[in-house]
Image (cartoon, coloured by chain):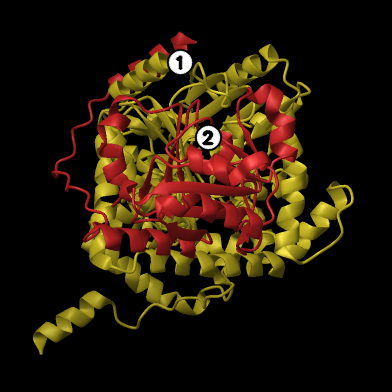
Amino acid sequence: MSEAKNRILARLRQVNPSAPERPEQPYAPYLGEDAPARLARFCSRLEAAHAEVVRCPQQSLAAQLQAMVKGASLTRLLAGNDGPFSAAISQAGGSRLSCFDKPMSEFKAVLFTDVDAGISQAWGAIADTGTLVLWTGPNEPRSLSLVPPVSIIIVAASAIMDNFAQLLAKPQCRQGLPTNLLLVSGPSKTADIQQTLAYGAHGPRQLYVVVVEDC
Amino acid sequence: MAEHSPRRFTPQAQEALASPVIRQNFRGAMDYLRKARSNAFSDPVEADAVLAKAEAVRRRCLSQLPALLETLEQRCTANGIQVHWAETPAEANAIIRALCQREDAKLVAKGKSMVSEEIGLNKHLAGLGIDCRETDMGEFIVQLDGDRPSHIIMPAIHKNKDEISATFEQHLPDFEATRDVDQLIAAGRQALREKFQAAEVGLTGVNFAVAETGTLCLVENEGNGRMCSTIPRVHIAVTGIEKVVEQLSDIAPLYSALTRSATGQAITTYFNMVSSPRRPGEWDGPEEVHLVLLDNGRSQAFADDELRQTLQCIRCGACMNHCPVYGRIGGHAYGTVYPGPIGKIISPHLLGLDDAGELPTASSLCGACGEVCPVGIPIPALLQRLRVEAKHGASAGHPPLKGQGAKANRLEALAMKGFAWLARHPRCYRAGTWLARRLAPFYPRRLGAWGQCRVTPKPAPKPLSQLLKEQRRV
Ligand code: SF4
């Protein structure tokens, strides 16, 4: 089909659009005053989007997760292989926890029917909009935060950025994006039926976020 | 349901106007969406800044379109995404069909994609025994009904929950009628979860394609786009050639302008950036990713400095949400894939000025669409331009548009010429107005459809020129 390409490009090249006359203004979205302001905004935005947010020190992360799992009666948990919070996740999950370590084709049925909650570890977060940034990969499968009815995402407070533009400006993004970089800003939702908001459209109905304050 | 066509705009609009349910459903939705948008842009200084930036980004990216498309293809290819080019809907369908057949696919799970509507993909694949299942809740409902989307963001906006419950009762096994939206959504979720697992191919649109990194961005709330681009073995993304942006940094203002204009959200639940197929060591994600780039008349709009602005569109739907015509007749009456103001300015390029029927004239030119458009498309000016192009031959130096001059009318042209002549010959003009005043008693009482809600005009006893003269004398 490269003929189609050549013809399309040839048509476009016949024209020589002038570059825009006015100089572009820089884009200036939200900037937090300091770390506490950022954290507060991040949490309040996420809560407004119907997520449940808790904060805790790293030391009590495992206990916090355990309480969460108990409170929501989650019995079958799934997490990625490895990450900064994996030790706490294992400790909290115990025998209820399994690891995402099979290819999708073999794992689909289990993932869709046998898992109550997926636990993800965020790479970053955005205060402006209350957004979690998931850098998915071998240790952080992308469907963890999508298929199970409950999604638990852990994020370090120090990883909270002010805004989306800051994320996109990171050298890691510009030089080597992962297969799938994901922004998550709440549980799955829809307003497709008579503008009435309903949660759990296709993804998780519930999103729990744990902010680890001291790392 | 009869197929709607832009050529039958007037009867379709009349039919819609006669339906109180349609009027009510749209009224409710328009009020909701307008309020949401205005809340989202409550700080006018900030709003101006972000929208000016979004417009500037779109203009800059379009000014470099061919180069950006080539960079996009290079980067995507380097990342392992296979890029295909299609000039026409038929070519795009052929590409997608070949990919599905190679996979021996029986089921395609499709995320929301207006371009797939534009090429008529569902019907094309159905003809080959491949079920192309809509998975966006609104699109899913519409597809069950054998209906078409009536809004580009909220496809089932023309239906209320009772109607949707009736649709589910008819098509979903074991569904019991309900007015509870949570239950309705849960039923849809259940039905579609099976499809995500069974589908061999997932298909989505693209909101922004980033040339710098070869990244495809998808904006959504439901997670069905993520499902379609994560679970099946093959992911096909289809988009128009205008969706490419230069750099990653271009996305931030566009995304903010898009979600706030569309539904008043500061951000959507998911922003999904796909840069490659599954890499070694990864457990999930598609093993193949394909990008289909469609022209279908976009290069025609691109060729003209004024009409090129049509391609700035980021498909937010704000223009239709604020259009007094759309708000009354709804999306189906237009008979085009893209309804409302954006539909009136893009359809002539996709279909031709002949097939786009009366669409460019189906506007009161009130200007609301141009005012709310986040990327500054002067929609009313473009409508006027298209009206001219539909009536006349191409002007010197401009290649003719598809269907150029299709609406030309000899009698009308003659009448206009006659009037122009009269206006340049004051004596004849005065004689004419004198005669018009004398003939006033013989004017017909009814002036056909035009007179339905208007009284027959009466010429003033004295023409304006005479009044002016008298005033000068005083
Ligand atoms: S024309 Fe403007 S307002 Fe209408 S959908 Fe496109 S971007 Fe939105």
Please state the horizontal and vertical placement of residue A110, each as a whole percent of the image.
73, 33
A123, B95: nearer the viewer: A123
Task: Inspect the image, locate mark 1, and give the three-letter code of the amino acid beneath it.
Answer: Gly
* Ligand 1 within 8 Å of the CB at mark 2: no
Q: Is the residue marked 1 within 8 Å of ligand 1, measured from its CB?
A: no
The picture quadrant where one finds residue B133 is top right
Which residue bears the numbered disc 1?
B80
Could you say where residue B408 lies in the image, as x and y percent from the top left?
46, 41
Q: Position of residue A155 (x, y in %)?
A: 42, 47
Tag in front: 1 or 2: 1
Residue lying at 89% horizontally and 51% vertically, measured from the top left: B174
Q: Residue at x 50, y 16 (%)?
A: B280
Which disc is residue A144 wearing? none
Kind of residue at disc 2? Gly
Please name the color used to draw chain A: red
Q: What residue did someone put label 2 on? A: B205
Chain containing mark 1: B
Q: Are the residues under marks 1 and 2 on the same chain?
A: yes
**Residue projecting furthest to the right:** B174
Among numbered discs 1 and 2, the one appearing first in the sequence: 1
Q: Nearer the viewer, residue B189 or A125?
A: A125
Q: Is residue B474 visible?
A: yes
Which chain is displayed in yellow in the rendered image? B
Tell me which residue sits at (51%, 74%) in the image. Answer: B443
Q: Residues within 10 Å of mark 1 (few under 14, many from 20)?
A: some
Tell me where residue B215 sits by quadrant: top left
**Residue B170 x/y as whole percent:** 87, 51
